[in-house]
Image: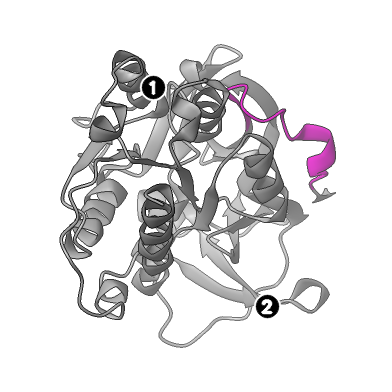
Amino acid sequence: MGVINKGEILLETGTNEIEIMEFKINNKLYGINVAKVREIMVAESVTAMPLAHPVVEGVFKPRGSVITVVNLAKYLFGNEKSQEERDLFIVTNFNKMHIAFRVDSVEGIFRLSWTDIQKPDKTVSGGEEGVSTGITEISGNLVVILDFEKIVSEIAPRTGIQAEDISKLGERKTNDDPIILAEDSVLLSKMILECLHTAGYKNILKFDNGQEAWDYLRTIQDEKSLAEKVSLVITDIEMPAMDGHRLTKLIKSDKILKEIPVIIFSSLINDELYVKGKQIGADEQISKPEIGSLVEVIDHLLEKNKE
């Protein structure tokens, strides 16, 4: 166990591949994007915190950093997971936070294409806002990839997108410039759309993944009035079918579409992935949930494009 060596396992950017870490809870298989994983640790003693959310065990302090521990079994099944000596902590890093999740075991790391990951049927996944971002097959077994951002935002709502951040920007004018949004989360896309509409951006075309956005861009790329169809693209990174890095790379490699500004808006923006985003040509990269910063960057790029 120990720190994940990202240098060995991070993929070449823009190839539409993902590394999934497979783990078990109550003998069921789940997955997490390796890009979210900081390290794997043998579970340590946890100090309970008063008035904490029921699924929060408390905190521990490895190497001087205080980290919150979430009992993932209790969140998923409602039953407190018995704490075993062999339990592991998956210490994650996303949305500029470090959070540990207690699991039974880690089964391994597997490389997949985003095309191998299917969006779960909302009739059996908890509705449109279920806790699974995708389902895939690994070694003949179905693996549910969990939406860790949603789990954390439910436990601590203040860590999610805050609509009131838009009001801090002051009075806004209506803007009809066409903007493409590629975001697979129903909950997050709804919140982002509401915030952008509040900020004055009314002409937004939303797609559920990078593949759908790219298919649309290809239908309009030869039009002389391209600017009237799309002025800017906002994309998440993690999406079934085609991820945001692949979408960005395709746009910036196209002799016509490359002039369109692309903003990567993702919970995965850290130093390593920021460099990779720059390598494929992203104009800006913003960490969720900084919706106010997103609006300010949209303002800047659209104004810059009109100069």
Point out the stretch of residues depicted in magenta.
Answer: 4-19
Locate residue 199 relative to residue 218 in the image: left or right.
left
Does label 1 or label 2 sit earlier along the sequence? 2
Secondary structure of the residue carrying tag 2 is loop
Q: 10 Å neighbourhood of mark 1: few (<14), some, or many (≥20)?
A: some
* 11 in magenta: yes
Camera-side residue: 73 or 169? Answer: 169
Question: Hey, which residue is sitting farthest top in the picture?
Answer: 140
Q: Residue at x 79, y 79 (%)?
A: 64
Which residue is at a point 29% across and 14% down the rendered structure image?
219
Q: Residue 209 in magenta?
A: no
Q: Residue at x 36, y 60 (%)?
A: 299
Q: Which residue is mark 1?
A: 214
277 over 157 or under it: above or below: above
In terms of secondary structure, where does tag 1 sit?
A: helix
Residue 85 occupies quadrant: bottom right
Identify which amino acid the numbered label 2 is placed on: Val
Image height check: is 62 above or below 271?
A: below
Classed neighbour count for the residue bearing mark 2: other residues with Cα under 10 Å, few (<14), some (14–19), many (≥20): few
Gap in angstroms between the C-alphas marked 1 and 2:
42 Å
Residue toward you, 222 or 181: 222
Left or right, 105 with respect to 161, comes to right
> On residue 66, which mark appears?
2
Q: Which residue type does callout 1 highlight?
A: Trp
Residue 277, horizontal then vertical, whole percent: 62, 42
List x then y, in percent, for residue 129.
25, 45
Q: Residue at x 34, y 70 (%)?
A: 157
Give the quarter of the image for residue 232.
Answer: top left
Q: Is residue 105 visible?
A: no
